[in-house]
């Protein structure tokens, strides 16, 4: 078992690194967190990571910070939360501060605008990868109910353009109902 100090240091370095080199929003960092904390360190199980992502996504605020909070808490309690938040917010704080000071130069620079367009394509690919990995994990469970919920949420968002907030709320309610029904079934 690793020492708490070593775990906190690894959480800080990991979240700092992930935040510094993740472009394109919270869903990108979630994939990288999964690779780091599930696949590399084996600190969290894959199903548990999906649960943590669901919690982070359904909470107000930036998903990268929310994800760092739930992972930090899971791994090292409140101190893990503080360490993971600090590691996650330092890179964007520094980068946005520099960009805001140099905004006029960045805004009209051809190379910067081309770089940003290229990054958009890469971000789209990474988000598609996250969607595939999370969706395939649900399909592998072979729970018809989970698959129907996932398909319904996809249709509601992509076809009917229903606000994601409503979809998350409805899915949360469905999850509570399923949990209550499972508890009743266990008691009988």
Image (tube, rainbow, N blue to C red):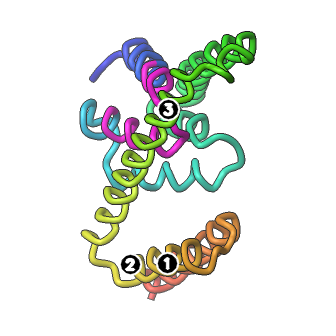
Percent position of residue 74, x then y? 48, 38
Q: CA distance from mark 2 to mark 3?
A: 30 Å
Q: Residue at x 61, y 69 (%)?
A: 172
Check if residue 97 falls in the magenta segment. no
Name the quarter where the C terminus is drawn: bottom left
Q: Which mark's residue is nearer the viewer, 1 or 2?
A: 2
* Residue position for label 3: 23
Is 47 above or below relative to 32?
A: below
Q: Quadrant of residue 110?
A: top right
Name the quarter where the N terminus is drawn: top left
* Residue position for label 2: 147
Percent position of residue 64, x then y? 56, 37
Q: Quadrant of residue 108?
A: top right
Is 141 above or below relative to 19?
A: below
Is 1 above or below relative to 174?
A: above
Pointers 2 and 3 in contact (C-beta within 8 Å):
no
Pointers 1 and 2 in contact (C-beta within 8 Å):
no
Percent position of residue 72, x then y? 51, 31
In this rendering, does residue 74 appear at all? no
Element type at mark 3: loop
Dot 2 or dot 3, earlier in sequence: 3
* Residue position for label 1: 183
Q: CA distance from mark 1 to mark 3?
A: 41 Å
Q: Residue at x 47, y 24 (%)?
A: 15
Q: Quadrant of residue 2?
A: top left
- Asked whether 40 or 63 is in front, the reply is 63
Dot 1 or dot 2, earlier in sequence: 2
Dot 1 or dot 3, earlier in sequence: 3
> Mark 1, residues whose alpha carbon is within 10 Å: few (<14), some, or many (≥20)?
few
Q: CA distance from mark 1 to mark 2?
A: 21 Å
* Numbered range of the magenta stretch: 17-36
Element type at mark 1: helix
């Amino acid at each position: 078992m690793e020492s708490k100090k070593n775990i906190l240091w690894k959480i800080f370095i990991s979240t700092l690194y992930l935040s510094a080199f993740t472009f394109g929003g919270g869903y990108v960092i979630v994939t990288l967190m999964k690779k780091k904390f599930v696949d590399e360190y084996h600190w969290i199980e894959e199903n548990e990571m999906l649960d943590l992502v669901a919690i982070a996504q359904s909470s107000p605020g930036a998903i990268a910070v929310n994800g760092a909070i739930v992972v930090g808490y899971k791994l090292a309690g409140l101190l893990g939360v503080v360490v993971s938040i600090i590691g996650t917010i330092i890179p964007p704080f520094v980068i946005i501060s520099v960009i805001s000071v140099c905004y006029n130069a960045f805004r009209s620079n051809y190379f910067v605008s081309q770089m940003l367009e290229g990054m958009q394509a890469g971000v789209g690919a990474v988000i598609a990868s996250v969607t595939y990995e999370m969706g395939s994990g649900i399909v592998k469970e072979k729970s018809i109910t989970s698959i129907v919920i996932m398909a319904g949420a996809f249709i509601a968002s992509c076809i009917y353009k229903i606000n994601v907030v409503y979809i998350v709320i409805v899915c949360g309610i469905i999850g509570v109902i399923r949990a209550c029904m499972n508890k009743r079934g266990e008691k009988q």
